Image: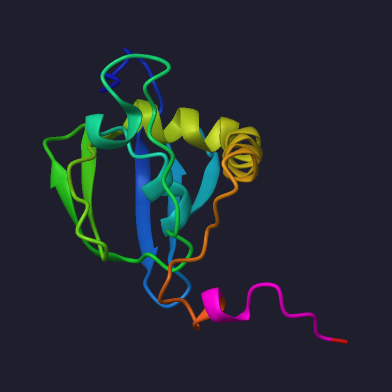
Amino acid sequence: MAGLSKNAPVPTEIKFHKKSRILDITFSDGKKFQFSCEFLRVHSPSAEVSGHSPGQEILQTGKKNVNILKIDPVGHYAIQPFFSDGHNTGLYSWDLLYKYGLNQDKMWQDYLERLKEANATRESDTDNNTASHRGCQHH
């Protein structure tokens, strides 16, 4: 897990919008970031997702509709979200969240590319029964 860098920006406000599944974070330097639950879940810093070393990342699939049930503070340096799919081992430090905010667009595009390469989907098997509609063409 990323530690806290000296003089690094820290959150001044954290708001979670359960309905839209968006976590808003405002940092002390004025930067504001919005993270979807799906983004945070598929980029969890836990060993279960990120592996124990570079190159061991485990591609997360079917997380499009994941939500956060609750968020616990961890000291004065991180948060621990509890996701609706049962995942709760990721500790998101302020440094990590700030880095995610600055790199979110690239991280998301990389994730979508990895899904495509793996022929995987963001949809879970229970999302609107999409599995039964695959291959159907609607005009």
Quarter of the image for residue 58 reads top left
The number of discs equals: 0
Please say whether residue 52 is one of the residues in the magenta stretch: no
Q: Is residue 104 left or right of residue 35?
A: right
**Residue that appears at 17% across and 34% down:** 76
| 132 left or right of 45 in image | right
Asked if 58 appears above or below 62 in the picture, the reply is above
The extreme left residue here reads 75
Q: Main secondary structure of the magenta part?
A: loop
Quadrant of residue 6 within the rendered picture: top left
Which quadrant does the C terminus fall into? bottom right
Lateral position of residue 89 relative to residue 6, left or right? left
Percent across and percent down for residue 2 are 30, 20
Outermost right residue: 139
The correct choice, above or below, for 125 with respect to 10 in the image is below
Q: Residue at x 53, y 46 (%)?
A: 33
Image location (x, y in percent) of residue 28: 43, 35
Q: For the magenta stretch, what is the residue range?
A: 131-138
Q: Nearer the viewer, residue 30 or 131?
A: 131
For residue 9, side relative to residue 73 (left or right): right
Name the residue rendered at 35%, 66% in the picture: 67
Image location of residue 109, percent across then percent down: 66, 40
Q: Relative to 22, is 109 above or below?
A: above
**122 w.r.t. 56: above or below:** below
**Quadrant in which the N terminus appears:** top left
Image point (37%, 49%), residue name: 41
